[in-house]
Image (cartoon, helix red, strand yellow):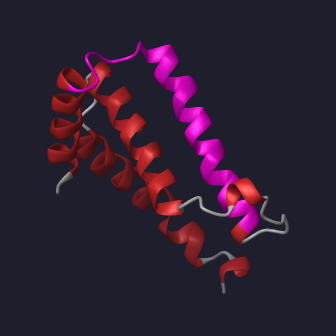
Amino acid sequence: MTIQEAQNTIDKWINTTGVRYFNELTNMAILTEEVGEVARIIARKYGEQSFKESDKDKDLGDELADVLFVLMCIANQTGVDLTEALKKNLDKKTNRDSERHRNNEKLK
């Protein structure tokens, strides 16, 4: 599935199963919540925190998909084509950072 296909699929789902989009501010709060759930798993699986019993069945892939879903909702409702935005962003990063990262002693 391409990014555009995913955005279209989510739009169709929202307008049928989901009834309508939450407003942008609500979706931003939901995105923050979902990113927090990803952070919680990362802190426990790769960091120094131990798992609580309630965290043991959490799936990182599922939580990342929740982040992606809400991010695409925000993109859809604000008219952002994520395919084009990502292309432009990668060009910006390539032009700005290619030498910077190659010359970074911490990355060698």
Asked if 81 appears above or below 4 in the picture, the reply is above
* Residue 39 image point, x, y percent: 67, 52
**Residue 74 within the magenta-colored segment of the rendering:** no
Asked if 10 appears above or below 4 in the picture, the reply is above
Quadrant of the drawing holding the C terminus: bottom right
**Furthest residue toward front:** 53
**Furthest residue toward bottom:** 108
Task: Say which of 70 and 103 sits in front.
Answer: 70
Horizontal arrangement in the rendering, residue 22 relative to residue 32 (left or right): left
Which stretch is magenta?
17-44
Q: Residue at x 57, y 24 (%)?
A: 29
Q: Residue at x 37, y 55 (%)?
A: 90
Quadrant of the drawing holding the N terminus: bottom left
* Residue 68 image point, x, y percent: 40, 45
Task: Say which of 107 and 24 sits in front.
Answer: 24
**Residue 27 within the magenta-colored segment of the rendering:** yes
Q: Residue at x 59, y 44 (%)?
A: 35
Horizontal arrangement in the rendering, residue 52 relative to residue 31 (left or right): right
Number of numbered markers: 0
Please identify the quarter of the rendering in which residue 57 is found.
bottom right
Q: Main secondary structure of the magenta part?
A: helix
Asked if 62 appears above or below 69 in the picture, the reply is below
Q: Residue at x 52, y 34 (%)?
A: 31
* Residue 51 image point, x, y percent: 78, 64
* Residue 70 image point, x, y percent: 41, 35
Asked if 37 appears above or below 78 in the picture, the reply is below
Horizontal arrangement in the rendering, residue 62 relative to residue 53 (left or right): left
